[in-house]
Image: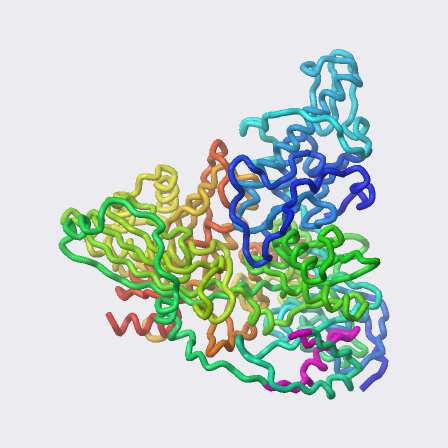
Amino acid sequence: MKSQVTRREFFATGTGVFVFFRAEAPQAQQPEAAPLPGRSPFPTDFNAYLRISEDGRVACFVGKVELGQGAMTSLAQCLADELDVPYDSVDMVAGDTGLCPFDMGTFGSMCSPMFSPVLRAAGAEARAVLLRMAAERLDAPVERLQVKAGVIADPAQSKRVTYGELVRGQRIERHLEKVPVKAPAAFEVIHHSPERRKDGLEKVTGKARYAGDVILPGMLCARILTPPAHGAILKSLDTSAAEKTGARVVKDGGTIAVLHERRDVADRALGLIRAQYDRPRTGVDDQSIFDHLQKTGPPLEPAGESGSLAEGEKLAPAIVERTYLNSYVAHACMETHSAVAQIEGGKVTVWASTQAPFSVRGAVARALGVPQENVRIVAGYVGGGFGGKSAAEQAVDAARLARITGRPVQVVRDRAEEFFFDTFRPAAVVKIRSGLTSAGKIALWDYRVWGAGNGGARTIYDVPNQRTMFSGNWQGGNPPGMHPFDVGPWRAPSANSNTFAIESHMDVLAAQAGKDPLEFRLDHLGDARLRRVLQSAAAQFGWKPGTAPTGRGVGMACGIYSNTRVAGFAEVEVDKASGRVRVKRVVVALDQGLTLNPEGMRQQMEGSITMGLGYTLSEEVHFRDGEVLARNFDTYQIPRFSWLPKIETILIDNPGAPAGAGGEPPIITMGASVANAVFDAVGARVFELPITPECVKAALQRG
Amino acid sequence: MERTITFTLNGKPASVTADDERALLWVLRGDLGLTGTKFGCGAGLCGACTVIVDRQAVRSCSTPVKDVAGKRVLTIEGLEQDGKLHPIQEAFLKHHAYQCGYCTPGMILNAYALLLQTPRPTEAQILAAMDDNLCRCGAHVRIVAAIHEAAAAPGGAR
């Protein structure tokens, strides 16, 4: 990610770029709702997104952030194709509020569906304007001109001019209305897989710079005292031993920090602080949380209803009622929340690992009481996000400490702090009351979810009498005390919990009906795209019809997330003595509509499958009375190489449909496909995630 | 104890004057400005800080700097030779064997040590050798493919 344009040039020539930013940036922790139709939050002047220098290189400015999901690659493809320049000539400048146009944040898999059309439109308009400029320069009708790789040629006169010669690094002052983007048949870069990702070379050479890699002259490394539990109140404090290390101690409001030029000296100083706290005794822990959520959650709200539950009950000879649970899950990005802040002449610059630099700009400005215009947030490479870096309090901490000390300050959380301050995926309880007609069709579906939220809560199946209710959500706004700590978005928020419950229950009902789970799903599924995805995955998997449990250890799940259709099949091996589950093979098929970078999408599918093994098999945040017992990778187990199943991905080619979500959907099927495979293997069903050995043994005992 | 420690860093002589109990990770990143070596867990549990000391992969967060006195230390910054990527780096590039990239230097160096000791590892040997290097994005299958490819490449195990 390098820029050919200096900041000064950009500001000098780029006035008007920031017209569309919001007067009040939202809370960093609260991802914004999708904007109202017809009111794009993005700048409409294409100059905000691109700058062509004399040598023909194109700088592409996006407020999105590279979290590893490959957005810099797919967005470069968008601009290259619409502008008709080589992919290799595009240099990405991303996540820098001083250089890039407003963006609400890199979350919700919105790069492909929401932002790529904006960037493509900018490229298409710029190309059309350049053609008109060339027509004047070459004294030729526009229709006669041809464009290839940033060179406009007039074959009739054998004359040509390059984009670089036309523009010479300047802002383009002309505009055109409603320039169409390319049709899929005309794609040369979009919908193809570049040989190199934009971020590859820097990542394999160690040159990729993350926020914590910014080293400034005179910089101090800060460590901030963390309470032992959420809700703990500081009673006494002795920092005298810490001060003897040479570290500077700062007490500001509730913040107690030690700072030193050397990180490890600051670490040692922090360890020497003697602090006593009053600890809360809430009685809530990872066992009692499920009752607690139902007791403390807000009143159930409707998320969809059709037909009549009373009618459904009449049609169903027997009611099948089950409860599904899942635990709090951490983001556990390999890069902990990091930031470096510098204040010079009233201008604040913060390099921060964040998914939402424009929100962080507002938060820093408010914390320091300075105008937002005086704050610049730079989110360079970010070492994983998954929703966990929507909040970026560490940036505010660094900025406050920089002001207090008068020096640049780095804040890099250690691993225990990362777990402690994480905004976990909420624990959830789902209760489903259902019933089948005598013909084995679902007549009744009464769905209630506490904690997870309403995303993907409504069944995708055709059920005449159904109701979906939810209590609480991951976005916040939950009653105080419902969750013992902050919750937030975690890759495909709501959908992992709800898909686990819905798709486990589909297998429960299929078994009740004596039907093959695939056939049972197809019997209730009208969505043609999802049917195709499900059937493609089944074919690749080699699904053989049968009524579970067959003893083979195979299972499936499917769902729709932000317009993307996904189906996953899993094969497992269960050791009945230990309860240990090993996932041997996973097949996932997906229809995203238009896929900008097929190879990139496959990486997201493989990543989702691998990451999904964690929330499915091992990941749960243990806690007690506000104390987070997950402290490092020994007390919180994420997937490892030795867990790898054989992974097969199928990407349905459907470029005529609008791009759906990419980075999140393929993770939603993992929980239920494995739970269903465990049932198929041993005839005992697990109703909770993660599917730990203890949980499997308990299920086997229940029978 | 504060003293001067000399060692070979990426093929060149290096020396630092520091408390010799300090972790090699912070000396590399803070004193020597080599930020390719990452902090992940601080307890030798994730492998993000992996460097090579005398042909062995070590966790620099848990290695006191005194332990490398007189030894040869290789970090990700020293893997390229004469401006040419190491075959493992080439293989990681080709297979897109990274996503966020934060674990990547540690992955590459851990794989480097594996190939020094086992030039043509089996799948099972790769999984075992890499098992304590964590990746949250799920690039694992591609990392395995990249290591196989590097093992087959000329100079992959050097």
Q: Is residue A244 above or below residue B128?
A: below
- Let me know if residue A258 is in the magenta part: yes
Instruction: Determine which quarter of the picture holds residue A598.
Output: top right
A529 horizontally vs A259: left or right: left
> x and y percent of residue A471 in the render?
38, 59
Q: Is residue A630 above or below residue A64?
A: below
- Let me know if residue A639 is in the magenta part: no
Q: Residue placed at 76% from the left, 37% from the top?
A: A57
Query: What is the tally of numbered marks visible in this picture?
Result: 0
Q: Is residue B63 above or below residue A150?
A: below
A560 horizontally vs A238: left or right: left
Colour scheme used in the picture? rainbow
**Residue A411, can we see it?**
yes
Name the residue nearer the viewer: A195 or A17: A17
**Residue A206, can we see it?**
no
> x and y percent of residue B116 in the render?
67, 66
Q: Residue placed at 41% from the left, 46% from the top?
A: A560
In magenta, the rendered stretch is A253-276
Q: The C terminus of chain A lies in which quarter of the figure?
A: bottom left
> x and y percent of residue A83 in the render?
67, 30
Instruction: Determine which quarter of the picture holds residue B30.
Output: bottom right
A627 horizontally vs A555: left or right: right
Q: Residue placed at 67% from the left, 59% from the top?
A: A366
Instruction: Determine which quarter of the picture holds residue A362.
Output: bottom right
> x and y percent of residue A54 in the render?
82, 33
Name the residue nearer the viewer: B95 or A534: A534
